[in-house]
Amino acid sequence: MAGSTHTVSNQVPPLVGYDVFTADRALTAAVERHLDPDLLDEVLGELSALGQASGSAQVQEWGKHANENPPRLRTHDRYGERIDEVEFHPSWHRLLGKGVSAGLTAAWGRPGGHVRRAAAFLVWTQVEAGNGCPLSMTHAAVPALRTDPELAAEWEPRLTSMVYDRELRPARLKAGALFGMGMTEKQGGSDVRANTTSARPLAEDGTYELTGHKWFCSAPMSDGFLVLAQAPGGLTCFLVPRVLEDGTRNVFLVQRLKDKLGNRSNASAEVEFDGTWARRVGEEGHGVRTIIGMVAATRLDCVLGSAGLMRQAVAQAVHHCAHREAFGGKLVDKPLMRNVLADLALESEAATTLALRLAAAYDDGGEQERALLRIAVPAAKYWVTKRCPPVAVEAAECLGGNGYVEESGMPRLVRESPLNSVWEGAGNVQALDVLRALQREPGALDAYLREVGQARGADHRLDGAIKNLLTELADLEGVEGRARRLAERLALVLQGSLLVRFAPPQVADAFCAARLGGDGGAAFGTLPHTLNLAAVVERARPVS
C-alpha cells in the first residue's frame, strides 16, 4: 500500500483520447477554406477518423514503441548469403500501413488531393514522424516518374495505392509499393553534380548498370529508388528496383545504418551499387531537372512535418498549463505563461496556414500557382523548419522538469525538430534557391507579390513590411550574403498576409505586431501585453 507521502495530486492527465484533427482550429479552418465545398463532408470525415486514431492510446503506443526500438540491419543470413535487409519493430509496420491506407501517398489522382493529404500528413506526423519519410518520398516520386510516361503508367498505380505490402518481391506482384531516394554522396553532399556514381549503358535501351555509393538513402527497404548517377551524357536520374522482375534481389548493398539524433524509427542507410540494374528516368544529362519535382514535393513535406511537430509541441504545452496549478491558480491564467503560450501558438498557426496554402497551390495547378510555389516553397522550407527547434524547446520548458523526461514525449519532439531543416537541402541551399527563383523566373516574384498584395491595406504593419521587402528586392548588390535574410522576410510577409486575410483578428494582430512590426523580442513570451493573448491561447487549446 502506498504511504501518504505518495499521494499524487496536481498532475496533468495525458493528452490522449482526442481527435487531433478537429482539435486543431487553424488546420480545420484551412481545409475548409481550400477545398471544394462538395468535397468537405467526405474529407472532414476521413480527416477526423485519422485524427481520432492519432489521438488514441493505442496508436500513440505504436509511435512510442517504434521510436524506442530502432531498425536493425541484417547484411547476411544464417548461411552467409548477403541479404541486406532491415528489420523493424511491428509498430513501425502498423504506422506505415495506417499512413498508406489514410491516403498519404495518394494525392496525385484524388480531387483536392494535396490539401487533404497535407492535412493528414500534418496530423499523422504528430504520432511518430519517422514513418513520414517513406510516405513522403513515395508521394513525391510521382512527378519525377511522369517525365517518362511508360514508367509512370507502370509505377504510379502502385505508388498511389492505399495498400501497404511490406514483402520484398517483384513490384508487378504487389498491390502497393513504396519509394526511396538516393542523391547525396560522401564527396558532394548537396552538390549533387559532384556525384561519382557511374552508369554504364546496357544492351536493352534505357537500362544501365550502376557502380558507386550513396551517403544517405532513407527507407532502404522500399521497393524502388530514384537515384542520380553519371551517365555518358552527364548526371542522370535512374529508377533502381529493390527486386528484379525474375524475383532475384538487385545489387543493393546496405553498408550501415546511420545513428541519428532523432528520427530513430526510420532507417537511413549508406548503400553501395556494384553492377546494380537501373532504368533511366528522363533524358541523359537532365538528372537534376528530372528529379526536381520530387525534391519540391519533399520540401513541402518538410514544411508540413515541421508544422505538425510544432502543433503537437504547442498542444502539449497548452494542455499541461491548462491543468497544472502553481502559485494559486492555473498556469494558463498566469500573464507571463499566457504570453509564452500565445507566442508559441502564433508560430504554429502561421506554419500551418502557410503549409496548407502551398498544398492548395499544387491542387490548383495553374501557371500563377506554379510560379508562386517556385519561390514560396524554398522560402517556407527555410523559415518554418528553422522555427521548429526553438518552438519544441520552449514548449518542453512549459512542462518544467517533466518536459525533460522521456515519458512526457517532449524530448522526442525536441530531437526530431532540427531534421526537416537539414533534409532536402539545408538552410543555405533553400536561401540560394530563393535567389535563383528571383533572378531567373520573374513570374515567381510577380505571383508572390500578387498573393501578399491581397491583404494590402488591412494592417499597417503588414503594409510596412511589404514596402521594406520591395526595397530589399530593389537592391540586389551583394545579394548572396543577404539570402537568408531575404528568404526569412519573404516567408514572414507571406505568413502575415495569410493570417490577416484568414485568421481571427487577435491572431493576425499579434503576429503582425511581433513578427512584422518589431514589437516582440528574440525569445518567446515577449509579445506586447496589450494584445488579446487569452484568445490566442484558447484557440490553440487541443479540445475537440
Image (tube, rainbow, N blue to C red):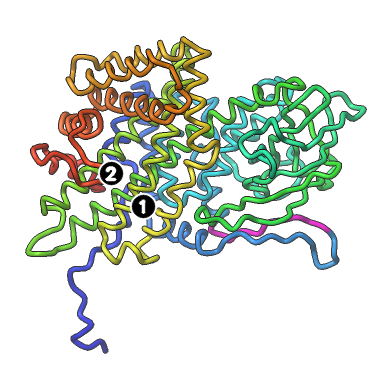
Q: Quadrant of residue 520?
A: top left
Residue ID at (54%, 28%): 296
Q: Left or right: 277 with respect to 151?
A: right
Q: Quadrant of residue 24?
A: top left
Residue identifier under label 1: 55
Magenta segment, which residues?
82-91
Q: Do residues under tags 1 and 2 come within 8 Å of each other at their CB atoms?
A: yes
Q: Secondary structure at mark 2?
A: loop
Q: Quadrant of the N terminus?
A: bottom left
Q: Left or right: 470 with respect to 302?
A: left
Does residue 89 show up magenta in the picture?
yes
The extreme front residue here reads 478
Q: Quadrant of residue 240?
A: top right
Relative to 220, does residue 475 appear above or below in the rendering? above
Residue identifier under label 2: 23
Relative to 319, does residue 327 appear above or below in the rendering? below
Which amino acid type corresponds to the residue marked 1 in the rendered image? Gly
Question: Is there any visible trace of residue 86 in the rendered image?
Answer: yes
Mark 1 or 2, nearer chain start: 2
Q: Nearer the viewer, residue 197 or 300?
A: 197
Relative to 111, does residue 387 appear above or below in the rendering? below
Q: Name the dominant secondary structure of the magenta segment.
A: strand
Q: Nearer the viewer, residue 431 or 147?
A: 431
Q: Position of residue 47 (x, y in %)?
A: 39, 39
Which amino acid type corresponds to the residue marked 2 in the rendered image? Ala
Q: Secondary structure at mark 1?
A: loop
Q: Position of residue 275 (x, y in %)?
A: 86, 42
